[in-house]
Amino acid sequence: MSELNKIVMKIVSKGKGILAADESTGTMSKRLDSVGVKSTSDSRLSFRETLFSSEGMKNFIGGVILYDETIKQTTSSGVKIPELINKSGAVTGIKVDTGAKDLSGSRSEKITEGLDGLRDRLKEYYTLGARFTKWRAVYSISSSTPSKLSLISNAHALARYASLVQEANMVPIVEPELLMDGNHDIKKCYEVTAEILKICYEQLDLFKIDLSGTILKPNMILPGKDCEKKASTEEIAEMTVNCLKESVPNKVPGIAFLSGGQSELEATKNLNTINKINNTNFIMTFSYGRALQQSALKYWGKNQKDIINTKKIFNHRSKMNNLSVKAEWSEQKESQTAA
Ligand code: 5MM
């Protein structure tokens, strides 16, 4: 087992998943605004340290993805954030892309930036305690997208990123996200996701990436948000498992889904059904941002002093997703534990 594979397994084994807390300041400010809290570096830290110091971290969270600001912060009791995360048994991760910018040569698509100076930034993040990283490419479906230009250029950037990260002895999370926006049906999402993944793995192969030391963070196969024909959880699970089986090389040990705008319950339920029928060798877990944090944030927005109950809400969500990874979640357990 390589060192990188050991890190992967520490993150995704035992039903554990990833807490994506890597919202850039702009996104985090929108999230805080939505619950009536002014976004400052202190308020961002305060909510995040509440989550990172909760009980749920120990049993259910194998890794936390941080943003540049957070990895350099220290808690109110003087503990460095990576230390706090490591103390709970989870691995510290860091988002290293600098965001999706307009793709020159395309009218509406994005290219993820952040390769310039990345080798040096990785050294710094390693020293700060990071052992895995994340880079997110975004694609959308319309009559003319995703274009070949977007498919190839984003995959190429993901592979260059992954190569630099492995060179720095860290695990790259490869996140090609096909957005849910649009009225396309589930079949279209399947076809486009398969194509995105195929091109990503061609580029990763070109750069000789050690796939056993990577984690894939894909979207589930879902109909577009505005599609009239809704899909059942069984249909979503079956198409997701089939698509990944067909498009992802066997050497990839772990797949950690993004929630992508699904509600907390949908994301949990779909992951549970996926794991009920998972007939692959991939560990299928979660790397949720909104689907792990939404309820806790909403409560904390109104009750900032009530750390205990904010933590309880986060613990519950983490536990429900841990049950889903083990295909043991049920609506009954959801309501019993919540009560
Ligand atoms: C947590 O949000 C991450 C990105 O934030 P920015 O847009 O501010 O950079 C995002 O990459 C996230 O990690 C993934 O999309 C998964 O989050 P969701 O909420 O879709 O599970």
Image (cartoon, rainbow, N blue to C red):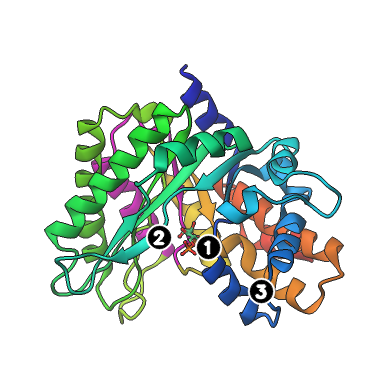
Is residue 67 a member of the stretch shown in magenta? no
Q: Is residue 57 left or right of residue 292?
A: right
Question: Residue shown at 75%/50% (left/top)?
Answer: 74
Amino acid on which disc 1 is placed:
Ser
Answer yes or no: do the residues labelled 2 and 1 have beta carbons within 8 Å?
yes
The residue wearing badge 3 is 39
The residue range painted magenta reads 233-260
Question: Residue shown at 23%/64% (left/top)?
Answer: 103
Camera-side residue: 319 or 35? 35
User: Does the closest atom of ligand 1 sit within 8 Å of the Cβ of label 1?
Assistant: yes
Camera-side residue: 275 or 130? 130
Amino acid on which disc 2 is placed:
Gly
Answer yes or no: do the residues labelled 3 and 2 have beta carbons within 8 Å?
no
Q: Is residue 204 left or right of residue 164?
A: left
* Placement of 142 over or under 101, stated as above or below: below
The residue wearing badge 2 is 99
Camera-side residue: 63 or 277? 63
